[in-house]
Image (spheres, rainbow, N blue to C red):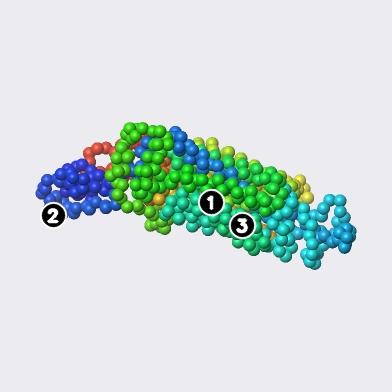
């Protein structure tokens, strides 16, 4: 009833403007309402009308409606300058793909055996092949054409000189360079840790910095330092130096990935965001497919590392040609820099300023003296819905990338007898092909079902594949022990491979879609921090792979069971998420709170929804109004309370 009292005190039934927080007669030069008799309640007591002070930090809603006013004025993606910037965010994806999958070649476990030679360098005929547990990284067997002894023991690890056969197309890699076998094999897993841990910390820290100083400085400084640390990795003198420098390389790579992802999202109108992001994913996967050929050309791991890092030199020119995110400048109320960038856009696109029908530039000049308002990701703790959405997507990305390793080990074999192939390239391209098929399937599914529906479908597929693999295969294993069952271990292995392929297919889509979903529902002022959280969660999921390898696959079954339980929890939590398809990106935290849960299926035409939308709650005037409540939702307002394009 507070709204009714304010209106009665104002002397009329006209609703008070709430977008910019102004009060007629108090701000804006309007005439004040004539004083009248104080209103009385049902008992006849007088009620004093308290004046409502306007908020001092109110900003023009036109400037905060980037997708509805600023982006159409600049031409959306129709402008030549905008298309050039999107292309510039795609080009580094190929080099990023090289860097992400370089561990498969630099740290691949080769086939090795002890080499004993006489003083003249001739073979003495005594070969001691080392047999180790197959962990999916490589099989241990002697070279073809040489005699194989009956077996070996732990004392054979005391060999002074090793002979290696590297399967990954290189003549020498990190393992063969420093003899990281037998008692030193654990150092390989530490080297894998270093890059992933660097990515995790990089996503968390650079995300917060990108919200405070901007996307462009983070991108440029990350490029400079990845050149320094990446090229120094190739000059490492021992594995300790290699692992330490790989941590900093991963940290800088995370800054490049995050800033490019945010810039790409913030450049696009609502209808093109998913398509632009998927093109970048396909280019990154092209780097994954081309990586074996690049390794075969380089032959040496140091040359390969230098070739991967050197293309980042071209990104130094981004300091000259790539501007700051205009959306971030507008959201943080840096209007002076925004005006200069808008003029740069209009000049590059050869636009006429008369196309500014809504008056964005004049409104910008009025607010140009306003102080910038930057926000940290910690502010999300005080929200009601936003923090829940981000936490749900973090758990989804953690589960998707974590269980992906479980399916990969089930298919490639966490035991030597379960391996489908010992060919490095067959295993590598199988993984890459499944990832490519997953991204191809995401395009029509997300286009038809939306972000939330697509994520829910892929998570259900992941849960089914995981539960069937854990439960049905154990049942098949019990029946295969019976003499009259007609089942064998080969049937169980075939089912295991089939469920693993489905699980890898769907879990890859879950992880990728969770990152994209978070980028859409997180407000612009904290988008870097939100992306950093969900990308760091994905990194924790990937980190489970070297952890399991370090423990020689001990606890593998429990590891799979835990992630299978997480998929069931995620299915329930996904229902709490909003739908962001064709919605304007939220610019500030109140806009992010407008993204609230709604039914998966839209209500039928003429059917009254169970819950009022935010826009309807905002315009609700009370029971004393004689106007009937309109059935359904307005055509230009979605269930999130946000305007659609």
Separation of disc 2 and disc 3 at Cα? 81 Å
Quickly name the residue at label 2.
Answer: 45
Toward the viewer: 106 or 626? 106
Secondary structure at badge 2 equals: loop
Marks 2 and 3: which is nearer the front?
3
Residue at 72% in and 58% down = 177
* Precedes in sequence: disc 2 or disc 3: 2
Secondary structure at badge 3 equals: helix
Toward the viewer: 288 or 498? 288
> Residue 370 at what x, y percent from top left?
30, 50
Toward the viewer: 602 or 509? 509
Quickly name the residue at label 3.
Answer: 232
Which image quarter: residue 607? top left
Label at residue 223 = 1
* Precedes in sequence: disc 2 or disc 1: 2
Residues packed near mark 1 inside 10 Å, few (<14), some (14 to 19) or many (20 plus): many
> Residue 66 at what x, y percent from top left?
38, 42
Quarter that holds the C terminus: top left
Residue at 67% in and 59% down = 188
Q: Is residue 559 above or below residue 23?
A: below
Residue at 40% in and 50% down = 525
Q: Is residue 118 above or below residue 491?
A: below
Secondary structure at badge 1 equals: helix
Which image quarter: residue 585? top left
């Amino acid at each position: 009833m507070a709204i009714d009292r304010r209106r009665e005190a104002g002397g009329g039934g006209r609703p008070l403007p709430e977008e910019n927080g102004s009060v007629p007669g108090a701000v804006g030069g309007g005439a004040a309402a004539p004083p009248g008799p104080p209103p009385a309640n049902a008992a006849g007591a007088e009620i004093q009308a308290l004046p409502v002070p306007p908020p001092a930090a109110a900003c023009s809603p036109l400037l905060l409606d980037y997708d509805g006013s600023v982006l159409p004025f600049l031409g959306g993606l129709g402008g030549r300058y905008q298309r050039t910037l999107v292309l510039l965010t795609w080009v580094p994806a190929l080099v990023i793909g090289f860097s992400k999958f370089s561990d498969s070649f630099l740290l691949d476990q080769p086939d090795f055996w002890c080499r004993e030679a006489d003083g003249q360098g001739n073979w003495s005929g005594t070969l001691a092949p080392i047999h180790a547990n197959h962990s999916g990284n490589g099989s241990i067997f002697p070279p073809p054409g040489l005699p194989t002894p009956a077996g070996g023991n732990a004392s054979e690890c005391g060999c002074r000189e090793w002979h290696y056969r590297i399967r990954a197309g290189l003549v020498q890699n990190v393992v063969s360079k420093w003899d990281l076998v037998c008692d030193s094999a654990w150092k390989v897993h530490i080297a894998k840790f270093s890059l992933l841990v660097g990515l995790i910390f990089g996503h968390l820290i650079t995300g917060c910095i990108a919200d405070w100083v901007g996307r462009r400085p983070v991108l440029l400084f990350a490029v400079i330092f990845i050149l320094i640390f990446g090229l120094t990795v190739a000059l490492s003198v021992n594995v300790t130096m290699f692992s330490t420098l790989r941590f900093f390389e991963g940290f800088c790579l995370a800054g490049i990935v995050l800033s490019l992802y945010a810039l790409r999202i913030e450049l696009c109108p609502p209808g093109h965001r998913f398509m632009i992001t998927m093109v970048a994913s396909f280019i990154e996967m092209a780097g994954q497919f081309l990586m074996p050929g690049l390794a075969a050309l380089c032959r040496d791991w140091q040359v390969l590392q230098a070739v991967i890092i050197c293309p980042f030199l071209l990104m130094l020119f981004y300091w000259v040609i790539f501007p700051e995110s205009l959306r971030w400048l507008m959201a943080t109320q840096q209007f002076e820099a925004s005006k200069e960038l808008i003029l740069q856009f209009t000049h590059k696109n050869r636009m006429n300023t008369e196309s500014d029908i809504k008056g964005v530039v004049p409104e910008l000049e009025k607010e140009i003296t306003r102080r910038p308002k930057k926000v940290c990701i910690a502010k999300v703790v005080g929200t009601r819905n936003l923090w829940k959405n981000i936490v749900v997507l973090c758990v989804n990305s953690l589960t998707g990338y974590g269980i992906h390793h479980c399916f990969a080990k089930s298919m490639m074999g966490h035991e030597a007898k379960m391996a489908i192939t010992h060919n490095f390239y067959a295993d590598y391209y199988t993984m890459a092909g499944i990832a490519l098929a997953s991204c191809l399937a995401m395009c029509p599914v997300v286009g038809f079902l939306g972000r939330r529906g697509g994520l829910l479908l892929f998570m259900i597929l992941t849960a089914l594949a995981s539960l069937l693999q854990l439960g049905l295969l154990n049942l098949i294993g019990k029946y295969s022990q019976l003499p009259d069952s007609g089942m064998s271990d080969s049937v169980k292995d075939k089912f295991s491979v089939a469920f693993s392929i489905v699980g890898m297919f769907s879990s890859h889509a879950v992880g990728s879609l969770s990152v994209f979903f978070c980028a859409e529902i997180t407000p612009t002022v904290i988008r870097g921090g939100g992306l950093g959280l969900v990308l760091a969660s994905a990194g924790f999921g990937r980190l489970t792979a070297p952890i399991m390898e370090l423990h020689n696959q001990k606890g593998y079954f429990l590891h799979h069971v835990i992630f299978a339980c997480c998929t069931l929890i995620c299915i329930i939590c996904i229902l709490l998420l909003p739908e962001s398809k064709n919605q304007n990106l939220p610019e500030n935290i109140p806009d992010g709170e407008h993204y609230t849960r709604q039914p998966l299926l839209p209500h039928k035409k003429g059917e009254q929804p169970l819950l009022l939308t935010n826009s309807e709650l905002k315009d609700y005037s009370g029971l004393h109004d004689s106007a009937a409540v309109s059935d359904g939702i307005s055509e230009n307002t979605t269930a999130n309370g946000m305007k659609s394009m």
